[in-house]
Image: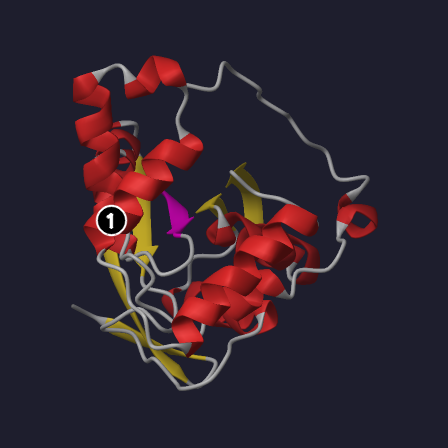
Amino acid sequence: MPFVESNGMRISYQRRGRGEPVLLIMGSSAAGHVWTMHQTPALNRAGFETVTFDNRGVPPSDAPAGDYALADLVADTAGLIEGLGLGPCHLVGASMGAMIAQELALARPGLVRSAVLLATRARSDALRRAQSAADRELRDAGVRLPPEYLATRTVMEMLSPVTLNDDAAVATWLEVFALSGGGTAPGQPAAVEALADRRAALRGGPSIIHIGRYR
């Protein structure tokens, strides 16, 4: 797997297809190859080049000890875009990856042609802070839950009764969430936990908001 030097980190990446580049940014603890299950093949067929990568903390990218700031992950991503000569490029981010994408668009707009933000947010709230604190207690106690257990918990938290009653869909989602890593990058959660209220900074940008039935 190739690497690029970015912001003092060795970041592993993969390029597929030809065309305008689309950089896909995965969420907390998840490896970039999760995108290859569905998204990169579809984008390649549509005539785009896809670039996936492993955020710092996710092997084989460098995984320095300690907590990471969201700004660190944004700088890593900017350096990858510059190092590979991708900019300005399309961004697709999921969860923490979407937070990285939106902060990158604010900080380095010249690197971004467009941004698709999946399952993002611009602030925290009481429930998320409580969940983050509970997760941190587990990490500090040295507890590492198996990816398969975390996958089943995530399915129960995130999917609707319609999907939970569809065995084929449940099997697919369990595979996706198990493949996502199961909390193997202990420095990354701090970046999400420290999220400030970014709504004012994000106002004014041209946006298309797509809301569908949550399944």
Q: Nearer the viewer, residue 147 or 24?
A: 147
Magenta region, main secondary structure: strand
Front residue of this view, candidates 185 and 201:
185
Q: Position of residue 161 (x, y in %)?
A: 38, 17
Q: Amino acid at mark 1?
A: Tyr
Residue 138: x and y, percent?
41, 68
Q: Residue at x 83, y 48 (%)?
A: 200
Q: Tell me: 199 left or right of 148.
A: right
Q: Identify whether 181 is placed above or below 169.
A: below
Foreground residue among 2 and 54: 54
Relative to 69, does residue 41 appear above or below in the rendering?
A: above
Instruction: Locate residue 156: give its quadrant.
Output: top left
Quadrant into which the C terminus falls: top left
- The scheme the figure's colours follow is secondary structure
Residue 170, position as x, y percentages in the image:
23, 26
Q: Which residues are drawn in magenta? A: 20-26
* Residue drawn at the location 28% of the way across and 58% of the way down: 31
Point 41% across, 63% down: residue: 85
Count every numbered label the image shows and give the total.
1
Asked whether the viewer can see residue 17, the reply is no
- Can residue 22 be found in the magenta stretch? yes
The residue tagged 1 is 149
